[in-house]
Amino acid sequence: MSSPGLLMRRPAAARHTAVLAGIDRLGALLTLLGAAGLFLLPFVLFKANRIVPGDSRSVAQVLPLWASLGFEAMLAAVAAVALLIANGPLRLAAALGGIVGLAMALAAAANALTPPHNIIVRVAPGGGFWLLAAALGLLATDAITRMRPGPGVRVLLLGLFLGAAGLALTHGTFDNVSIVREYSLHASAFALAARQQVLLSVGSLGAAVIVALPLGILCHRAPRLKPGLLGALNVIQTVPSIALFGILMAPLGALAAHVPLAAAVGIRGIGAAPAVLALFLYSLLPIVANTVAGLKRVSPATVEAALGMGMTRWQTLTSVELLLALPVILTGIRIVLVQNIGLVTIAALIGGGGFGTFIFQGIGEMATDLVLLGAIPTVVLAFSAAVLLDALIEVLDRARQ
């Protein structure tokens, strides 16, 4: 028989369980991360110049009392939504509002700490800012996942985000933030690096598609060749990127020294040539493997029906098999493009250019803001490429069904 005390405690325990069941677990984790960033880590770092470590400043130290309390209240409201509301659009609105508030707090802190007409002082985002930004970004990502938007909506959200970020950076509000100051000092070099980053990534991908697509078709048509070819490409894939760049420098340098035409067209031991060749070699395996997998997915009955209608083998391949395999092939191309965007940064070590120029220059000068000037655009470029190709793949998959 149950005791009276136990019977009295059961309703309270049930209520406690019900309250816990109503709390979003991911929201709780993100709230803890945000609270740690806000109260335990510095919000900004005040640096007398670009290379010194800097002094830590909290939100309360850099903002007026009313602004500090308002910022904390706004974050508390976002946390309440993350904890208690499962609705995707409301969670997204709260996350975006938090991101805007966080950005404005950073701009206000930079403007408050920077003396007028001073171009030496740097006010950099601190660990607290980055942790808050990560928590809000994950909340926004979770909200978009719950909403399950179509490919067009995802591309639209990406465009709105990039447009809003571009307008914010050109408005002047963030001019005193350290990363924006580094950009203003390297604007022309940044534009050149951006072009190099895109050209190296897309150019090596285009060359790889021209070679890898026929190789994938050959492996599908002649299965005996598949293990050896994919094995050789897999060996290339396992070579560390910096090692492959170094290996290619010697033969390309010798080629340029002995063949004037090669040197005339830009083939040298350092620069873009070894970078493009290495990226090309890294790109082959994913495209070849996905081409084989995509063609294998095509139903033999579909191929027989096409042949029965009078189509030639070539027409069947180009108009039926490759068309049906295209979503899988594009998945390999997506992997390669995102991979190449990241690897181009390492190619800066051999004179390949791109955003890696700022990363390694910043490391050499111990200038964190210069490192971020190269790292953040690389991440944004890779993320944008992934979103766009994912949307295209989904559209083609729906058309295939």
Image (tube, rainbow, N blue to C red):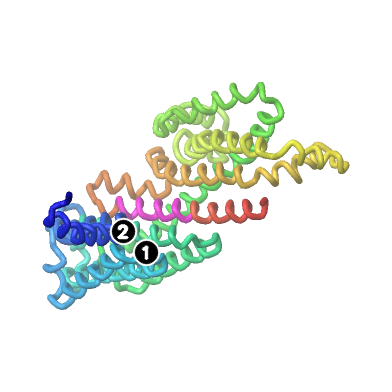
Residue 381 on the magenta span: yes
Residue 310 on the magenta span: no
Q: In which quarter of the image is residue 120?
A: bottom left
- Asked if disc 2 and disc 1 are in contact, CB closer than 8 Å, the reply is yes
Q: In which quarter of the image is residue 351?
A: top left
* Residue found farthest to the right: 310
Name the residue located 76 percent from the left edge and 38 percent from the top edge. 301
Classify 78 as above or below 256. Answer: below
Residue identifier under label 1 = 86
Q: Which one is nearer the viewer's eye here, 151 or 315?
A: 151
Q: Position of residue 283 (x, y in %)?
A: 53, 37
Q: Position of residue 195 (x, y in %)?
A: 48, 54
Please, what secondary structure does the residue beneath circle 2 have?
loop
| Left or right of 284, for residue 188 | left
Classify 275 as above or below 182. Answer: above
Name the residue located 49 percent from the left edge and 55 percent from the top edge. 387
| Magenta stretch, overall SS | helix
Residue identifier under label 2 = 24
Inspect the image, locate mark 2, and give the three-letter code of the amino acid beneath it. Answer: Asp
Name the residue located 12 percent from the left edge and 75 percent from the top edge. 65
Work out how far the residue at label 2 is from the one at label 1, CA to CA, in angstroms. Answer: 7 Å
Q: Which one is nearer the viewer's eye here, 51 or 393?
A: 393
Residue 126 in view, yes or no: no
Q: In which quarter of the image is residue 37?
A: bottom left
Magenta stretch bounds? 371-384
- Circle nearer the N terminus (2, 1): 2
Q: Position of residue 237 (x, y in %)?
A: 48, 30
Classify 292 as above or below 232. Answer: below
Q: Position of residue 10 (x, y in %)?
A: 19, 57
